[in-house]
Image: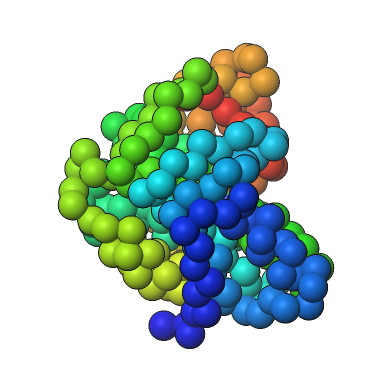
Amino acid sequence: MAGYKVISFDKIASTQTYAHNLIARGAAGNCVAVIANAQTAGHGRYKRRWVSKPGNLYVSFIFNDTARNPRLSYAVAVAVAETLITLGAPATIKWPNDILIDGKKICGILIEYNNDFVVVGIGINITSCPDVEKYQTAKLADYCNASRADVMKCLMKNLDVWRGADFKAVRERWTELAAGLNGDVLYRGAPAKLIGINDDGALILRRDDVDVVVFGDEISL
Ligand code: BTN
């Protein structure tokens, strides 16, 4: 396993912001994990608030990465889903990288590039899950007794495995774990069929028998 350097806080504004500040100060390195028990300014994709009560896992991993890589988000999603499955929760993946249990969101992933690094922020609901207007939420404690340390240990191992894996293997596993595959989804307000992901890491939707290739957006199941 990679030698992770873990920087741990009881409470912090945001592990993601802290990680970016480390990079800005020239104090970051490969495989640094910034972890907190609670966040006061946790945030997700599209600057949405990420409610961060004590007891869940809030972590931002810093990895060396100079080039934007659309495939990375699938490797991370598979690593998180495999972690939850190993610990006893039947996780699936909603494109691009929300992790669901019984159709409810248990984890969000935020991937941001910064100079020679990529910051991979992961929030996993363990002991509590917030009420969110747009979607239902789940927590790990309803499925197993895993602690934050158990989740973190398994997650670091799986990140090593799936970040290092061939994209063919990642894509195969992602496809097995994908929620709503071959089903109807909503993309930009209109229905489409979820076909899968291609070699470049783009989502393939089908509308009126025409395949639509989508990068970095959102769908509703
Ligand atoms: C999303 O679903 O929009 C992504 C949510 C990402 C939340 C994590 S929690 C750890 C890290 N710190 C943050 O402020 N955000 C990410």
Which of the two residues, 142 or 88, is positioned nearer the viewer here? 142
Q: Residue at x 21, y 39 (%)?
A: 142
Q: Residue at x 18, y 48 (%)?
A: 144
Residue sticking out furthest to the top? 190
Scheme by which the image is coloured? rainbow
In the displayed structure, 82 sits above or below 220; it is below
In the displayed structure, 49 sits above or below 187; it is below
Q: How many marks?
A: 0
Which of the two residues, 149 or 79, is positioned nearer the viewer here? 149
In the displayed structure, 199 sits above or below 158; it is above
- Residue 187: x %, y % from top left: 62, 23
Which of the two residues, 45 or 91, is positioned nearer the viewer here? 45
- Residue 34: x %, y % from top left: 55, 65
Q: Residue at x 78, y 77 (%)?
A: 26
- Residue 78: x %, y % from top left: 43, 56
Dividing the picture into quadrants, the one containing residue 156 is bottom left
Tell whether 41 sits left or right of 177.
right
Tell whether 117 sits left or right of 110.
right
Q: Residue at x 29, y 32 (%)?
A: 102
Residue 63 in sight here: yes
- Residue 58: x %, y % from top left: 48, 53
Tell whether 48 sits left or right of 128.
right
Residue 122 in sight here: no
> Which quadrant would the N terminus be assigned to in this image?
bottom left
